[in-house]
Image (cartoon, helix red, strand yellow):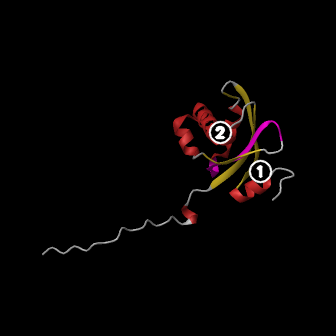
Amino acid sequence: MNKTKSRAPRKLKILPTHLREKKRYLAFEAISQIPLKREDVIFLLWEGSNDIHGACGTSQLDLWVLKVWKCPYTENNIIRGIIRCKRGYLGELRAILPTITRFNGKKVVFYTRGISGTINSAVKKFIIFKGQDE
């Protein structure tokens, strides 16, 4: 008789924090003539990054749009958000933002509000709107 042991599937081990890729979080603000959504920001970043750095360079940046907030106190279409990238590629990410000038034939302006090492500090320092209840 052939006896085989049935084993439960093994759980993958999590990589220790000192071996993980370090990330940085860039807080941005975008002013546009039309309302922008998170999907629009993702599209604009990928298009801008592909134009400047190409497909290989874009993949090295490890871009990720974490969250986008709409400014509640203005009539304009102003949004703020946080973009994640690898630690050594902040210059490349910051080079993408000024190249984004139009979306669907309307003007768009992106600028950097600040850079942080954690999401929580980026939100507290750069995203909170003046007069907003906490």
Is disc 2 placed on a helix, strand or loop? helix
Question: Residues at badges 2 and 1 in contact (C-beta under 8 Å)?
Answer: no
Residue 41 x %, y %: 65, 39
Circle 2 residues within 10 Å: few <14, some 14–19, many ≥20: many
Q: Which mark is residue 127?
A: 1
What kind of residue is marked 2? Val
Residue 72 x %, y %: 80, 45
Residue 97 x %, y %: 69, 37
Q: Give the main secondary structure of the magenta stretch.
A: strand
Instruction: Tell me where residue 103 sits by quadrant.
Output: top right
Residue at left offset 46%, top offset 67%: 13
Pick the front one: 71 or 7:
71
**What residue range appears in magenta?**
74-88
Magenta-colored stretch includes residue 32: no
48 horizontally vs 7: left or right: right
Q: Quadrant of the C terminus?
A: bottom right
Q: Is residue 133 above or below residue 6?
A: above
Q: Which mark is residue 41?
A: 2
Q: Which mark is residue 84?
A: none
114 horizontally vs 19: left or right: right
Pick the front one: 55 or 4:
4
Residue at left offset 83%, top offset 57%: 133
What kind of residue is marked 1? Ile
Residue 69 in view (yes/no)? yes
Is disc 1 placed on a helix, strand or loop? helix
The residue at the far top in this view is: 105
Residue at left offset 59%, top offset 37%: 46
Residue at left offset 72%, top offset 31%: 34
- Distance (Cα) linking label 2 and label 1: 16 Å
Circle 1 residues within 10 Å: few <14, some 14–19, many ≥20: many
